[in-house]
Image (spheres, rainbow, N blue to C red):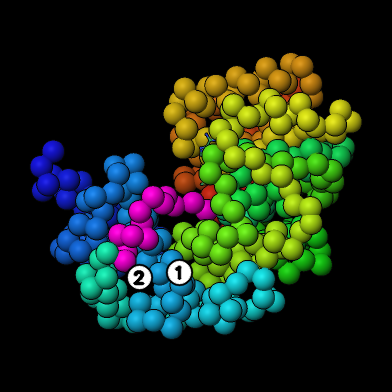
Amino acid sequence: MTLEQRREEIRERYAHFFSPEDALRHPLYAGLCAQASSDDTLVDILLDTPEAQARPNLVLAALHDLALEDPNGELAANYPTAAHFAACSQSPDTPPREPSTAPPLDPGAVGAVTTWVRDHRDLVAGRMEGRSTQTNEIGRNAVLSAGVAEASQGRPVALIDLGCSAGLNLLVDRYRVERSDGHVLGDRSSDIVVHTEVSGRPMPTDTAQIAWRAGIDLDPPDLDDEDAVRWLLACQWPDDVARFERSRRAMGLWRSMDPRPRVTAGDAASSLERVISEVPDDLQVVVQHSWVATYLSTEAQEDLAGILRRVMERRPLAWLSFEHPRLVPGLGHPAGTVERIPGATTLFLEDSQLGPRVLAQAHPHGTWVRWEA
Ligand SMILES: C[S@@+](CC[C@H](N)C(=O)[O-])C[C@H]1O[C@@H](n2cnc3c(N)ncnc32)[C@H](O)[C@@H]1O
C-alpha cells in the first residue's frame, strides 16, 4: 500500500466515525473528524500507529487525556471535562461535584485543536503509543440491574463479569438506578445515579442480592494508577460532563472499597471455568458480558458460548449477554420474535432451566430500555 492509499484509508475512518445524530451531540469531535478530509494533521499522526489501533478514537482520547492532564493549558480550553476535572483536583477521590452543562462550542475550537496537534505532534504521538481505547460504561447498569434481578430467580447471586474493564459493573447494586417507571434499583442512598427511560413490558423491580463477584478482562485498567484512571476518563467524549462525573464517582467508590471485587487479567474464555469453580455451591451463578463479545472473532464467540453451555449442563448458570445482535453471530443467540429497534443493543438471558430468550433492547449506554420479556 502506498503512503497516499494509507492516508486515504485513515481519512475514510474519520469520515465514518460519527453518525449524523452523534455529530450533533459531539460538535468538537465531529468537527475534528470532518477536518481530516481536508487537513492531514490528524491523519498523519496515525500513519505510524499499528493497523489495529489506527482509529480516530485513539487520537481523540490522547488529546482528551492531554487536556485532562493539563487542565489550565491551551488545549484544555476546548474541553469542558478538563475544567470539571480541575475543579475536582484531577482525582476520583474528591467529593461529588455537580456537572455543569458544556457551553456551546467556540467556532474556532476545531482550528485551535488542529493547530495545537501540529505544534505538539511528538507529545500526541507519545500519548498514543502502546495504548488502545477502553471504557467502562456504568450507564449499562440501567439494563444489567434488571437482567441480574431476572437471572437471580430470587437467590443470592455470584456475579461474574467477562470483559469487565476496571470492574465497575460488578458494583451494580451500589449505584442508584432510577427508572422512568418510578422504580429505583440498587443503593437508594448512592450519589452515583444511572437514570433511564423505560418502555415495553413491566421490568423486574427487585435489586438482586450479590453475594460474590469476580471480573475477568484481557487488560484491566488499574484504578490505583492515576494515569490509568485519567485514560479511562479520556476515552469518553469531552462534552458529556455528567457522564464523566458519574464515572469519576464510580472510580472513587471502587478505590474506597476494602476489599474490592476481584478482577483477573486474562482471556474470558480461558479463565471462565476456573473462576466458576470457585463459586460457593449455594449461589446462583450469573455470568454477564456487555460490549465484549462484539470484539471477538466469530470462532472466539463460539468457543465462549460452548464453554458457557457446557457448564450449564453441570450446574445452574444464567448467562446474560448485552451485545449488538448483528455483531455476535458466534454466540448462537436465537433471533426470537422481537421487532428489532435500529441501533439497539440486545440483552439476552440463557439459563439451565428456561433456555434462551430476549429480555430487552436498550441504548448501548443504557439511556433507554425497552423490556421485552
Ligand atoms: C468496550 S469494553 C466494555 C467493558 C465493560 N464490559 C463495559 O460494559 O463497560 C470491552 C472490554 O472487553 C475486554 N476484552 C476484549 N477481549 C477480551 C477477552 N478475550 N477476554 C477478556 N476481556 C476482553 C477489553 O479489554 C475491554 O475492557
Give residue 253's quadrant in the image. Answer: bottom right
Residue 117 picture location, percent across and down = 26, 69
Element type at mark 1? loop
> Residue visible at 20% across and 46% down?
9
Instruction: Bin the neighbour count of mark 2 within 10 Å (Cα to Cα): few under 14, some 14-19, many 20 and up.
Output: many
Q: Is residue 289 above or below residue 13?
A: above
Mark 1 beta carbon near ligand 1 (under 8 Å): no
Where does the magenta region start and end? 123-135
Q: Is disc 1 surrounded by few (<14), some (14 to 19) or many (20+) residues within 10 Å?
A: many
Q: Which residue is mark 2?
A: 28
- Quarter placement of the N terminus: top left
Residue situated in front as seen by the camera: 360 or 107: 107
* Picture coordinates of residue 281, whole percent (x, y): 86, 28
Residue 18 in sight here: no
Residue nearest the viewer, comparing 7 with 258: 258
Amino acid, disc 2? Leu
Residue 197 belongs to magenta span: no
Q: Are marks 1 and 2 in contact (CB under 8 Å)?
A: yes
Q: Position of residue 197 (x, y in %)?
A: 64, 59
Snapshot quadrant of residue 121: bottom left
Point out residue 255 in the picture as x, y percentages from the top left corner.
69, 61
- Marks 1 and 2, Cα distance to the nearest angstrom? 9 Å
Would residue 120 be found to the left or right of residue 346 on screen? left
Q: Nearer the viewer, residue 244 or 146?
A: 244
| Residue at (27, 81) in percent of width and height | 108
Whether residue 277 is visible: yes
- Image mark for residue 163: none
Of 88 and 156, nearer the camera is 88
User: Which image quadrant: the C terminus?
Assistant: top right
Q: Which mark is residue 238?
A: 1
